[in-house]
């Protein structure tokens, strides 16, 4: 839906792959300009990125300049709560939304400081922002997370923690959750989200959001999701996009986009 249609909101979740020089042909420096151009072209209202190192964050922030948009962002590095390690930042259109509050917590038993959670292989973090839509007065929260790729207990406990935090941070409010869950929503870890509106429902059994940079590799899981804990009055079908550059995918994840009308 277009920018002029005031009541529609366009969300994207996108794991852009951290800056790893060992990726060779697919290293960040070789794809960043095109990836930023792609994101810019989507005319998005709210974006949840994952696997973003601080230098990548600066480059994305500097490069995103779509007409009519003024992106602002929230987030911290997961390793120190400042700039070290991967961010799970949320970008939003500052021309459309007013930030009411924002913050972060770690996906761990002590969610107030960096630490491994349960059986996780990596420190994991969740970023949130509470926004007011200046066009219609709607207030809602957005949570963006990157769950652990190894620890099944960590994924399950992280899902429970996020739901508790939503009730604490924005009680009785509308909540949006997006991110890289490192599992399909059919996983028992996400049983608490079964009643939520979710992008996964729009994808068939052969769809996938995680692959490699190589388009000749076919198949994989759906692990990137957008969810709402409220019913939306109207919506387009969620889409998995597969942006490419020089016959390679722009990341080893595909972005998920969903237009909804609150």
Image (cartoon, rainbow, N blue to C red):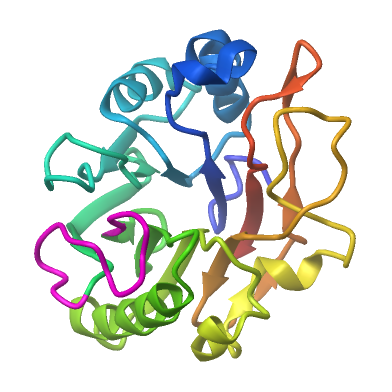
In-front residue for pair 208/218: 218
Residue, x 24% and y 63% (percent of image)? 116
Residue numbers of the magenta segment:
109-128
Q: Is residue 262 visible?
A: no
Quadrant including the C terminus:
bottom right
Residue 118 highlighted magenta (yes or no): yes
Residue 33 percent coordinates (x, y): 53, 11
Residue 111 position by quadrant: bottom left
Instruction: In the rendered view, tell whether residue 4 sits above or below residue 213.
Output: below
Instruction: In the rendered view, tell whether residue 118 sits above or below residue 94.
Output: below
Residue 53 percent coordinates (x, y): 32, 31
Count the marks: how many?
A: 0
Residue, x 28% and y 55% (percent of image)? 123
108 on left or right of 178: left
Residue 213 position by quadrant: top right
Instruction: In the rendered view, tell whether residue 207 sits above or below residue 189.
Output: above
Residue 99 percent coordinates (x, y): 22, 53
Residue 8 position by quadrant: bottom right
Residue 13 percent coordinates (x, y): 54, 49
């Amino acid at each position: 839906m277009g920018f002029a249609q005031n009541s529609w909101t366009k969300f994207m979740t996108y794991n852009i792959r951290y800056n790893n020089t060992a990726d060779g042909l697919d290293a960040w420096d070789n794809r960043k300009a095109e990836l930023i151009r792609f994101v810019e072209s989507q005319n998005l209202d709210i974006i949840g990125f994952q696997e973003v190192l601080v230098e990548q964050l600066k480059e994305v922030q500097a490069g995103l300049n779509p007409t009519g948009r003024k992106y602002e962002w929230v987030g911290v590095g997961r390793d120190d709560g400042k700039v070290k390690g991967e961010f799970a930042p949320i970008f939003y259109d500052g021309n459309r939304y007013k930030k009411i509050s924002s913050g972060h917590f770690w996906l761990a038993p002590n969610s107030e400081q960096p630490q491994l959670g349960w059986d996780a292989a990596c420190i994991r973090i969740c970023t949130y922002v509470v926004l007011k839509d200046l066009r219609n007065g709607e207030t809602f929260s957005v949570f963006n997370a990157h769950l652990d790729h190894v620890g099944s207990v960590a994924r399950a406990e992280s899902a429970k923690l996020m739901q508790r935090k939503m009730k604490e941070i924005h009680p009785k409010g509308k909540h949006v959750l997006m991110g890289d869950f490192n599992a399909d929503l059919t996983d028992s870890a996400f049983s608490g989200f079964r009643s939520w509106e979710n992008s996964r429902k729009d994808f068939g059994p052969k769809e996938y959001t995680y692959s490699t940079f190589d388009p000749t590799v076919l198949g994989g899981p759906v692990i990137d999701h957008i969810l709402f804990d409220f019913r939306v009055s109207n919506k387009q079908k969620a889409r998995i996009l597969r942006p490419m550059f020089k016959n390679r995918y722009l990341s080893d994840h595909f972005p998920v986009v969903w237009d909804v009308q609150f």
